[in-house]
Amino acid sequence: MSVAVRPVVRTLTQAQLHAYADASGDHNPIHVDEEFARTTPFGGTIAHGMLVLALIGEMMYATFGEAWSASGRLKVRFKAPTRPGDTVTASAQLVKSGDGAAEYAVQCANQRGEVLIDGRAAVAGAA
Amino acid sequence: MTSPARTSITALPRGHELPPATFTLSSTQGAAYAAAVGDLNSYGDTVPPLAVVALGLAALQEHIALPEGSLHTSQEVEHAAVIRAGEPLTLTGRIAQRSERQGFIITVIEFEIGPASGTAVRARTTIMAPGGAA
């Protein structure tokens, strides 16, 4: 199996951070309270790590469908904060494949090329 | 934001078992999650796989307080089965690792989520929290 994975590109907004907080139940003020967030070392709100990681999940599901839901594996590090207004590109590069499985180096980077998330994703059982 | 019923993550020792949590992810919740992250995939009667992990993390925060300045530094997820919308799910978890470095407590929470038929998702979440925080 050697399948090219199409990148996902998305600009995150503060409204999206609020929507994600409601959908996930994670209302940590660093994500949703702009006044509070200005007093922190980040100087403003930052996106939930899992919201940014969702772009990688979306990208992998778009390529592998339920094989991803049933066998996908992710191992990532959150390397830098993502801020409202950032345009994030999630991408994957094949690093190895065989026996019906494939492993990709995955990352999310912002419009300045800063890596926000990096790691590996693997999937088995896809045609 | 710290409720008295919750324990700071910095106070939880390695091996601590977290109280099981039960929840369901309806198709409406799955759709709300997909809309929030901007995901245009069609999931049919299933839910976005990472939505389950996100709700699992929220369930854990009913028992674990994260001090100000805590950072989610890494995440591992292993999907083992598709999850259908509306399936009752149970989360079980524990503190798998705890270490200290440069004034921060680094905690790895390991948890599994699945319906009655078995585990559908295994995850490991690493949180770095200021060591002086209660």
Image: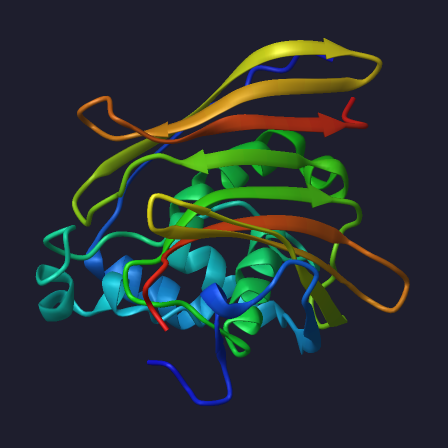
Seen at 81% across and 66% down, the residue is: B115
As drawn, the residue found furthest toward the bottom would be: B4
In terms of image quadrants, where is residue B129?
Answer: bottom left
The percent position of residue B69, horizontal first and vertical second, equals 28, 59
- Give the side of residue B31 with respect to residue A79, left or right: right
Q: Does the image show residue B76?
A: yes
Residue A25 rendering spot, x and y as whole percentages: 44, 72
Task: Give the vertical position of B54 relative to A59 (above or below).
Answer: below
Residue drawn at point x = 63 percent, y = 44 percent: B77
Which quadrant of the figure has residue A78?
top left
Residue in the foreground of this view, choosing between A57 and A83: A83
Q: Residue at the location (25% across, 30% down)?
A: A110
Residue A71 x/y as whole percent: 76, 37
Residue at 56 percent of width and 25 percent of height = A120
Please state, as top left, top right, bottom left or bottom right, where the C terminus of chain A lies in the image.
top right
Q: Nearer the viewer, residue A18 or B46?
A: A18
* Total numbered labels placed on residues in the image: 0
Give the quarter of the image for residue B3.
bottom left
Q: Is residue A112 above or below residue B30?
A: above
Drawn side of residue B97 relative to residue A1, left or right: left
For residue A7, say whether it is visible.
Answer: no
Q: Residue A18 at what x, y percent from top left?
A: 29, 66
Rendered view: A68 above or below A125:
below
Q: Is residue A94 left or right of residue A84?
A: right
A52 displayed left or right of A92:
left
Q: How is the image coloured?
A: rainbow
| Quarter of the image that includes the N terminus of chain A | top right
